Structures are given as C-alpha cells and as structure tokens.
Image (tube, helix red, strand yellow):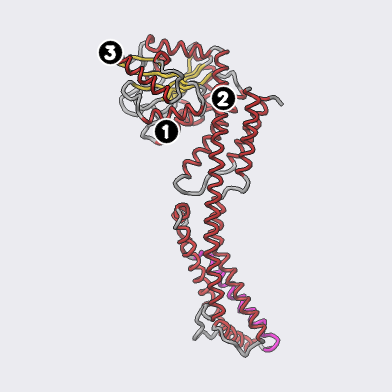
Amino acid sequence: MTAAAQLRSSLEGLSAALESFQFRVPGTGQAAKERSRAELVRSIREYLLPRLDDPDAPVVAVLVGPTGSGKSIMLNSLAGQRASEPGALRPTTRSPVVWTNRRHARRYQTLLGGLIGRENSGVVAGDDGITDQLTVIDAPDFDSVYADSRVIGEQVLAVADLCIFVASALRYADGAAWEFLDQIRLRGLPILFVLNRLGPDPEARKLILGDFAAMLKDRDLLLEADSSLIFDVSEQVVYPRHGGLHADAVAAIRQELALISDPGLRRAVVRQSTEGAVAEVIEKVGSIVDGIAEDRSIVTTLHTLAEEAYAAELTTSKQLVQAGSLMTPVGVDSREALQRELASALSRRCGVAARNAAAAWDSTDEGHALLQVADTLWRHGAETPAVAEGESTAWLDAIGKSLEATVRRARPRRKAAAALATALLSGQPSEEGEADAQAALVADLEDRVATVLAQDADRFLALTQRVAISDGLGDTISALAAEVSAGAGEFYR
C-alpha cells in the first residue's frame, strides 16, 4: 500500500470511529465537545479525504475577516463582477459565495452541500483564467451576531487550502479577529494578509501597517514585522456596476494568487495545508479522548448515585418488612384489600427511592440538566404500580400455596392465607404454617420488594446508558490517531 493510500485508510478509520458516537451528557461543556467532534469529522470527510483523492484540484482560498472589513467588495474586485453582494447592513454575507471556473462548479456543489444557498445560488462560475487552478470563497463573518453564520464560516474554513485575511484599518486590532487568526494558525494554513480601507495620509498608513505587522509577528503569524508582507488597499470608490474597486487596487493580490495557481507552487500550498490539517486532527483527537473519559466518569457517577439511592431504600424496606412496618394491615381482612394495600406500599417505597436518586442527581450540573428533560424521575415510574401489583399477587399466591398441605379446602385456605399475610406484614408470628415456612415467605417478600425497586431504578440506569459512550472507544480512537500520525510521517517526509 502506498503512503498516500495508508494515510487515507487511517483517516477513514478515524473518521468512522468519530462518527460512531456523540457527546450526549448535558452540561456546560457538552456543546463545545460535540462541536469539536463534528468539526473533526468534517475536516476529514470534507477536506482531507477529497484533497488526498484529488491533489491536483484547484486551490481553495477562503476570504475571512471581521464584519465590515470589506470581504465582499474584495471578492468582487478580484472577480471583476458582482459575485458577492456588498452593503451597508452588517453582516452582509450570510452564506458562502464561491467564485470559480465553470469547469469546477460541480465540485463545490458537492463539497459545500447545502451551505451555498438554494439551487446553488452561491456559486458564481465563469472563465477568468485565474480560476483555472484557484477558487475563492467569501465566507460569512466569523464575528457575526448570527450564530449560524459563525458555524457556517467554520465549516467553510474546514475546506480551505489558503486564507485571505481581510481587516480594515479601523478594526484590525479587534480581539475577535485575533482569536480567529489563532484558529487559522493552529490549522497550519498559509495566510495572505490584506489591510483594507487605509486613508490617504502616507505617515498614518505607514504607522498602521507597521503596527499590524508587529502584531502579526507577536502572534507568530509573520516571521518578521515586515509591512511589505501585507497587501494594503486604500479607501476608495466602489463601482456600482460590479460592487468592487478598480482593478489596480487588487492587482498585487491577483498576481500573488496567480503565482499560487502555478502547478508547482499549488502542490506546495496543498501539501502545507493538508499537513497542517492532519496535525490539527491528531492534536484535537487528544481533547476528544479526554472528553470521552470525562463523560464516562460523569455517567459512572450518575449511575452510582442512582444505584446507591435504590440500594439504601432496599435496605430500609427490608428493615420495614422485618419490623412489620412496610404497611399497616389493620382492618384489611380480605386478600383483595391486602393485595391492593401491599402494591401501594411497594410503589410508595419506589417513590421514596426515586426522590432520593433524583435529589442526588440534582446536586450535579449534568444530573440537573438530565432532570430538566426527564422530570418524571422525581416520582416512581408509570409502570411501577403494575409491577408492584404483580409482585403482591405472586406473594399472596405463594402464601396460599404454602398452606395447601394443612388447609385443603379453598375457602378456609384463602381466609387462612389472608390471616397469615396480615400476621407477616405486622411482624407477628402466626399459628398458620410452620416457622421455617413463614421465614421463607418473609424472605420472599423482601425479594419481591427488591424486584420492584430494581424495575423502577432501571429508568435512571437506562437514561445514563442512552447518554453513555461505549467502553474502550477512547482507546480505539487514540490508537487510530496514532495510525494517522504514522501514516502522515511516511507521506510528508
């Protein structure tokens, strides 16, 4: 197997393992963990595997930047046509806009799926020579007030080979911009920096460009604080015809993109971007494995809390049986009445256990969150009365059966069985039946109490199982990540 095939196979295996579960334990960190897992799968499925399958596909350059930085105008300027709709309202771009060659349009309809608008309205295809080997995507603003725009922006970034970071002279120092740049740096993507909307004063321009370059160097985004490594674009008129600037304003950027489109340099860019993406996958798997371990620990704790609550109630209930205090059979002189009262008593014990288990869960953040969607856990289950009635019936039947040898006629036996049941539930010895048989019947009642409690406890345990992650999955994912690392070492050496 070739190094490329080995790397691809290991990535397939890792992706399948990451797709085999979800982080379902609710809590403050659940959304972040699940988003990280989904992003890893997306990075593998939507970027790495397609790129490894087709290394000669066009370079994907994604325009990113804060709201109002002028990304849409930049795309229109590069394309020389109204590809993305600029405007005064922020954010302007709510879904990706793809500028590509018409020969490659179908690729992005598949790669970006439903992100590019209805009927692929977000794909702008033409015959510009620069798009033969390069596609530019205008991504939604990462600091948008719309949460879905931020998510879509991250999804688009996952398929990028190259980033064109556009900042405005007024907002280049915003914290949100630097947080997003850190994400791009960790991904290992090549970045072109564009400082847009600079004023006409030469000294002010020099000062702003120098400050921006120094900030980039401090964040390890430039090797040197060299402002010549930043593409500067002046504040100027936007032509209504195409919603962009004069071609001269972006000539240097177009020239750089044309160089990147050269087959030799394109392969180097793709190699750097895929190597960075693989490294990011391997690094992030560690946090996924930690998240799995954390979730399993939480589930174990919740499972134990519920078991302990029901175990404590079983101990209490057995003590009540021994003391003749499980129920008060005074005035209950028929089998039917005894059956009804005993079933009610068993259900009440389950209710006590349920409240104690729920209270224990409620003391934890995750248990509290689970109780918000499963509030019936505060009381005994809907099926518990029927189970309690069945166990009560069976116990009374067992009492009747124990008297068959000494009381042969049915009617007297039923009366004797009711008397014996009343005596046993009262904790008093009876003249009916032998002492050993009576002790066995008391033990049998304790077992039936345990059965009803266990059935009721299953509601808690079933819920923890639904949100639990399979045992050993963390180790499996770690091993698969190690295979990816080894495969990448062979492929990129």
Dividing the picture into quadrants, the one containing residue 57 is: top right
Crowd rating for badge 1 (residues with CA inside 10 Å; few <14, some 14–19, many 20+):
some
Identify the secondary structure beneath mark 3. Answer: loop
Crowd rating for badge 3 (residues with CA inside 10 Å; few <14, some 14–19, many 20+):
few
Camera-side mark, 1 or 3 = 3
Dividing the picture into quadrants, the one containing residue 55 is: top right
Q: Earlier in the sequence, mark 3 or mark 2?
A: 3
The quadrant of the picture occupied by the C terminus is top right
The residue indicated by pointer 1 is 150
Residue 238 seen? no
Query: Is residue 453 covered in magenta?
Result: no
Q: Earlier in the sequence, mark 1 or mark 3?
A: 1
Q: Which residues are magenta?
A: 380-407
| Amino acid type indicated by mark 3 | Asp
| Amino acid type indicated by mark 2 | Thr
Q: Position of residue 313 (x, y in %)?
A: 53, 69
Camera-side mark, 3 or 2 = 3
* Residue at point 59%, 69% (across, down): 450
Identify the secondary structure beneath mark 1. Answer: helix
Q: How far apart in space, not on screen, are marks 2 and 1 (Cα)?
A: 23 Å
Q: Position of residue 396 (x, y in %)?
A: 61, 79
Q: Judge from the rendering whether residue 115 lies leftward or rightward of residue 144; answer left or right.
A: right
The quadrant of the picture occupied by the N terminus is top right
| Amino acid type indicated by mark 1 | Arg
The residue indicated by pointer 3 is 201
* Residue at point 45%, 34% (across, down): 151
The residue indicated by pointer 2 is 274
